Amino acid sequence: MGTTVQNPPPRPDTGRGAPKPPLREHVAQSIRRYLRDLDGCDADDLYEIVLREIEIPLFVEVLNHCDGNQSRAAAMLGIHRATLRKKLKDHGIVG
């Protein structure tokens, strides 16, 4: 029998309007939908698939937010610029 893991309580809202769900809830919903869509089929290397599928839009959106400045994007991501450049190349994001 599997164990259900509970999410930690949401952080207090610091913005205007209704509290926004944390990013992890959006990710959890997407993973649940993906697993449901597998319709009983197994998925190999799910961990690698998820990392790749998260990294690509994360890098693209942060780079867009930083107007293409890789140094700023790397700082925002908390990684070295060389690491960002390697990952961009590995994912085929920057030619």
Image: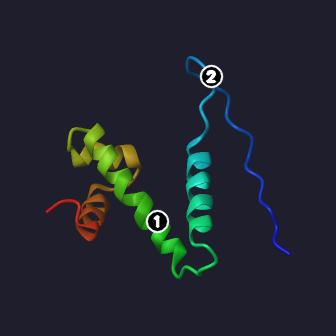
Q: From the image, state whether disc 1 or disc 2 is nearer to you.
A: 2
Residue at left 37%, top 43%? 76
| Crowdedness near tag 1: few (<14), some (14–19) or many (≥20) residues, C-alpha within 10 Å | few
Q: Which mark is residue 51?
A: 1
Apparent side of residue 67 relative to residue 46 in the rendered image (left or right): left
> For this rendering, which residue is in front, 37 or 7?
37
- Distance, label 1 to label 2, CA atoms, is 30 Å
Q: Quadrant of residue 32?
A: bottom right
* Secondary structure under the numbered disc 2 in the rendered image: loop
Give the total number of marks visible in the rendering. Answer: 2
Rate crowding at label 2 as few (under 14), some (14 to 19) or many (20 or more) other CA atoms within 10 Å.
Answer: few
Measured as percent of width and height from the top left, residue 12 is found at: 68, 28
Q: Does residue 40 appear left or right of residue 91 in this picture?
A: right
What amino acid is labelled 2 in the image?
Ala
Name, please, the residue furthest toward the front. 39
- For the point 21% across and 43% down, which residue is it? 69
The disc label shown at residue 94, or none: none
Q: Quadrant of the C terminus?
A: bottom left
Q: x, y (%) of residue 61?
A: 33, 45
Query: In this rendering, would 72 be left or right of 25?
Result: left
Q: Secondary structure at mark 1?
A: helix
Residue furthest to the top = 16
Q: In which quadrant of the rendered image does the N terminus lie? A: bottom right
Q: For the residue marked with disc 1, what is the amino acid?
A: Leu
* Image disc number at residue 18: 2
Q: Tell me: 19 left or right of 46.
A: right
Looking at the image, which residue sits at the far left?
95
Question: Do the residues bearing badges 1 and 2 touch, measured as CB atoms within 8 Å?
Answer: no
Q: Earlier in the sequence, mark 1 or mark 2?
A: 2
Residue at coordinates 56% horizontally, 21% vertically from top-left? 15
**Residue 11 versus residue 34 in the image, above or below:** above
Question: Residue 22 is drawn in which quadrant?
Answer: top right
